[in-house]
Every structure is written in structure tokens, then in C-alpha cells.
Image (cartoon, rainbow, N blue to C red):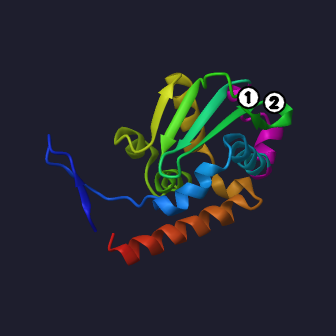
Amino acid sequence: MNATVDTASGFQAPRRPTLPSPFALPLKLIPGPVHSIALITALNVLFAASIREGEFEFLRDRVLAIQVRDAKVEYRIRFAGAAGFVPGPIGQSPELTIGGTIYDFLALATRREDSDTLFFNRRVVMEGDTALGLELKNWLDGMDLEATGGPLPSLLRAANGLMGAYERFSGG
């Protein structure tokens, strides 16, 4: 597997897959609010029980931006209490921006890689309200994925399997 080299330290990090540009182009042409609505719909279905139980109250009325760098897509979301996640206002600056590649977000979600490692190595980057970012990271770290029920555990297992297949075929 190819590696990237930090010329200052000589450290070699394994290359991580990125979305090829031809696949990113159609995603970039879709308006941002459409992307956000798709993500919001998925979050509200996948985390319906957590929303009902008030687990996201720490995010209430906070605007988050999620930037998927290789897909050139930004999602804007806000948590609105019992209504769940809703689109974030377009004109308002996000209080927290989280950026990474599709692979790194999947590695975070599937726990294939430790969240502290992803953040420390700046593969997943938080900007803005770092206290809010830390609270979100801690919530994600403490979440029992199997206990969420619904389709989430199956989706994450499938994503983990696809990532493993990619790594085997790419020599990683």
C-alpha cells in the first residue's frame, strides 16, 4: 500500500482511500440543502430512540457542519428537540465544523479506528466550539451501537466489511 510521508518528521502514514473525482462530481452538483435533508432523514430514523430519550439535548439549537472533503459535500444540521434533526440555517455560521474523508468518517462510525487517533492525526478535524466537539466525540465513544437497534448495527457491520474488503484488495 502506498504511504504519505511527512517530510519534516519522516513519518510514513498509510494512504487512506478517497472518493475518486468522477464520483465526487455528481455529488458536488447536488445542492447542499438536499444533502443535508438526506442526512437528517437518516439520522432521525437511525437515532429515533435516542432522540425520544433526550440524548441529543446537548446539541439543541446548535448548528453543526459536516464536511466530507473527498466528496466535496457539506451537511448543515441542527438538533431541534423532539422534532429531531433539522436543516441548519444556511446564512448562519456553524458552531462546530467536523471535516474528514468518507473513509475516515466510516472508520469513526464503525470504530474500525480509535476516535482519539483519528482526531490526533487530524484525519477528522473539528473547528469551532471545541467543548461541544469534545462532548459529541465522548457521546459517540460511549454509544453502544448494538443497543441502538433498528438498521444502524447492520449498516455499520456492512460498512466495516466493505472497508475490510477494500483493505485486503488494496494491500492494506
Pick the residue in front: 11 or 55. 11
Secondary structure character of the magenta stretch overall: helix
How far separated are the C-alphas under marks 2 and 1? 7 Å
- Disc sitting over residue 57 in the figure: 1
Q: Answer with the quarter of the image where residue 152 lies.
A: bottom right
Q: Nearer the viewer, residue 147 or 16?
A: 16
Q: Position of residue 64 (x, y in %)?
A: 63, 31
Q: Which residue is mark 2?
A: 81
| SS at circle 1 | helix
Amino acid type at circle 2 is: Gly
Q: Is residue 20 left or right of residue 150?
A: left
User: Relative to residue 69, is residue 126 depicted above or below?
Assistant: above
Identify which residue is drawn at 73% across, 26% down: 60
The magenta region covers 45-60
Q: Nearer the viewer, residue 8 or 33?
A: 33
* Residue 53 magenta-highlighted: yes
User: What amino acid is labelled 1 in the image?
Assistant: Glu
From the viewer's perspective, is residue 99 above or below residue 13?
above
Q: Position of residue 66 (x, y in %)?
A: 58, 39
